[in-house]
Amino acid sequence: MESVMIQLAAALAGSAGFALLFNARGEKLVWASLGGLLSWGVYLLFGQLYASDPARYFVAALVLTVYAEIMARLHKAPVTVFLVAGTIPLIPGGSLYYTMAYAVAARWAEALHAGLATLLLAIAIAAGILACMVLWHIAELALRWLCGRRFL
């Protein structure tokens, strides 16, 4: 349990640092940082259900994108502020490190295997964000068409 709390605190701090780079101040900084905590928390939670890392990354990216879309509308800020800051904990830095370490050591088979795993994680994150954004905007357009006014 202590390990999970440390991971969540690191996700919160890392997201806060990148939110500052995106000029998030005050309340936006807090909510952008909480997005990173949320994304890593979902990743850890779904670790109990899915053994597959790409599936966990995909679900975490889906949840984060819904969160970012809602926060952007509530705080009248670009989605990017919340989405990029919240995605930071999901970046597969460890597997990218191992890919490069194997490549530098000329262990090409292992470098290829680690590189493909890293690419698969990056695709899962991108697919989660893309799928959620497409569905969000389709729903928004449908509501606007049906009701004649903008929601959220």
Image (tube, rainbow, N blue to C red):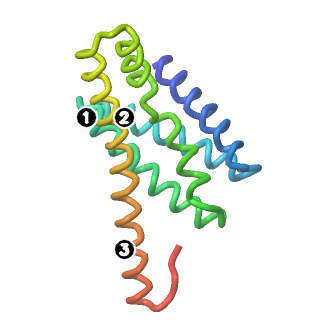
Which residue is at a point 39% across and 36% down the rendered structure image? Answer: 43
Give how far apart the Cα atoms at labels 3 and 2 are. Answer: 28 Å
Which residue is at a point 61% across and 53% down the rendered structure image? Answer: 81
Residue at mark 3: 138
Q: Residue 48 at what x, y percent from top left?
A: 29, 30
Residue at mark 1: 49
Q: Relative to the observer, which residue lies in front, 45 or 16?
A: 16
Instruction: Assess whether mark 1 and mark 2 are in contact (beta carbons under 8 angstroms).
Output: yes
Label 2 Cα neighbours within 10 Å, binned few <14 / some 14-19 / many ≥20: few
Callout in the foreground (1, 3): 3
User: In which quadrant is the N terminus drawn?
Assistant: top left
Label 3 Cα neighbours within 10 Å, binned few <14 / some 14-19 / many ≥20: few
Give how far apart the Cα atoms at labels 2 and 1 are. Answer: 8 Å
Residue at mark 2: 45
Query: Which quadrant holds residue 44?
Result: top left
Mark found first going from the N terminus, 3 or 2: 2
Mark found first going from the N terminus, 1 or 3: 1
Rendered view: 152 above or below 6: below
Identify the secondary structure beneath mark 1: loop
Identified by mark 2, the residue type is: Leu
